[in-house]
Amino acid sequence: MDELPDTLRTFINEPNWVFAKTYAKTWPHEYIVRGKVDENKFVQFVRHIRVHGYLGKLYSKEITYFDDSNMVYWTMGAPIEETTIINRCRKEQTYEYRLAHDDLPNNEK
């Protein structure tokens, strides 16, 4: 996995992440919205995730993930021009980690 360029590291460390309250008890994560952050850096980071990330699962859906500093980043796979959200969570909150540790939400096992 390639190292994150300094400009993108600065971008992901900015305090624009919103906690996804709807998923607080089942799939805690944060997200940023394209229209509320730097457009150029948003697109650069989406490209970085897709070029330097790895394929993983979210149930039966394949997602491209990118890990950095115990955080995992992903989009839902729409074309870049249609992508409006970047998500992130701690590594231990990912589907594959929780599946491997028998820690899926109770109603989703």
Image: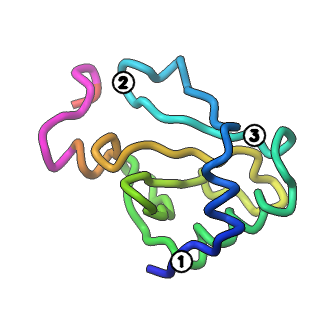
**Residue 101 counted in the magenta span:** yes
37 over 64 or under it: above or below: above
- Amino acid marked by disc 2: Thr
Image location of residue 86, percent across then percent down: 64, 48
Residue nearest the observer in this picture, 69 or 36: 69
Label at residue 52: 1
Query: How far apart are the two marked residues, 1 and 3, measured between alpha carbons?
Result: 21 Å
Image location of residue 14, percent across then percent down: 67, 45
Q: Quadrant of the N terminus?
A: bottom left
Residue nearest the observer in this picture, 7 or 56: 7
Query: How far apart are the two marked residues, 2 and 3, measured between alpha carbons?
Result: 21 Å
- Which residue is labeled 2 in the image? 26
- Which residue is labeled 3 in the image? 33
Q: Secondary structure at mark 3?
A: strand
- Amino acid marked by disc 1: His
Name the residue furthest bottom. Answer: 2
Say whether disc 1 or disc 2 marks the residue closer to the N-terminus. 2
Give the residue drawn at x 54%, y 54%.
74
Please report the bounds of the magenta region as a residue range: 99-107
Q: Residues within 10 Å of mark 2 (few under 14, many from 20)?
A: few
The answer to the question of whether label 2 and label 3 lie on touching residues, with beta carbons closer than 8 A, is no
Q: Residues within 10 Å of mark 1 (few under 14, many from 20)?
A: some
